[in-house]
Image (spheres, rainbow, N blue to C red):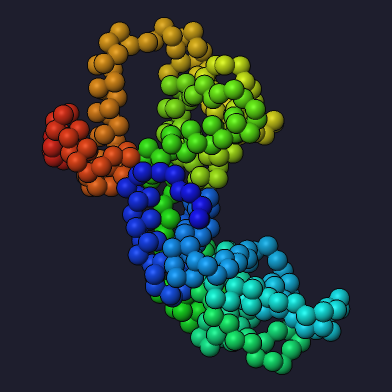
Amino acid sequence: MQTVIGESHALNTALDHISNLAGIDRSILVTGERGTGKEIAANRLHFLSSRWQGPFIKLNCASLPENLLDSELFGYEPGAFTGARRSHEGRFERADQGTLFLDELGTMPLVLQEKLLRVIEYGELERIGGSQTIKVDVRIVAATNADLPSMAAKGEFRWDLLDRLTFDVLDMPPLRERGGDIALLAEHFAVRFAAESGWHHFPGFSPSAKSELYRYKWPGNVRELRNVIERSLHRQGEDGEQIADLVINPWPDRHTVISNDTLPEASSRRELKSELPRDLRAALEQQEASWLEQALNQTTNNQKRAAALLGLSYDQIRGLMRKHGLRSRSLRS
């Protein structure tokens, strides 16, 4: 089972949901933005279920044209089409007694959606070019970042298939809602890349780089974070210094380096040094209060959601509110 890294409230809520659904032998739909770990969620659903000793078979529905997707899902017999010289087991047959993970489900053509619905309802299929009915016992876990109900309303997705696939819907949270997990993941990816590159050790991130990890919105989520971290380490190389520059954009013609030099409060490292706070403790207290107030404002004073944004527990954010005198909306305003 793949390892999940993080301690945030948003992630733990999703993991609890996975554990709760794993024992229910029903089809599950996993939703979330690109890079949020939908395949990892499907993997955990399988290995925490009673089917864990059975196969876990994956298929990206967006990676194949309709005819190949059909043959990959349901198999074919010799002579079914040009080049079909021998029998071929489809993913459903290979997943028998296990789990079939269908990624990018929203891209599946309507004609294949009808065939998929039949397998889910009756547990049987026929290979392309064949006449024998084949029985299969497969749990479906599907994933998408598309709005399937809206697609169904437009006739682009079958309502009956959507109903059968959604015994429950598991939503994976975006990285920007996982608070302190960003730093944990960045450290994990950095240490792993340093080891793979033969570095003696990973020297860590500079304070400005750590700050930028939280300021950036990470539209590509965990996948984008991993790429940025590995790219940044590769660009700097093993020089013993902390990683100061996060290379967000690798394109040479629009090269964007998020670093000390591009921070809005200073145009150069020299200016940055000249603006060091005279009272570090007071400055940190002020920054902590500012971030706390921003989180409360963004969540309309919902303390649990604000805690999740900051990677804190409910008790921790209550303590910080008392510390900074932010006990109510009126006091904050």
- Residue 235: give x, y in percent of width and height: 64, 26
Camera-side residue: 317 or 138?
Answer: 138
**Placement of 283 over or under 323, stated as above or below:** above
Q: How many marks?
A: 0
Looking at the picture, how far across and down is residue 239, in whole percent?
61, 16
Image point (55%, 45%), residue name: 223
Left or right of 164: which side holds 233? right
Height in image: 19 above or below 118?
A: above
The residue drawn where x is 53% and y is 88% is 122
Q: Position of residue 16 (x, y in %)?
A: 34, 58
Q: Is residue 231 above or below residue 9?
A: above
Left or right of 181 in this view: 301: left
Q: Residue at x 69, y 30 (%)?
A: 252
Q: Quadrant of the C terminus?
A: top left
* Residue visible at 26% across and 34% down in the picture: 292
Q: Position of residue 332 (x, y in %)?
A: 18, 34
Residue farthest toward the front in the current orientation of the protein: 53
Confirm whether residue 262 shows in the render: no
- Nearer to the camera, 194 or 315: 194
Is residue 270 among what the camera can see? yes
Which quadrant would residue 198 be assigned to in this image?
top right
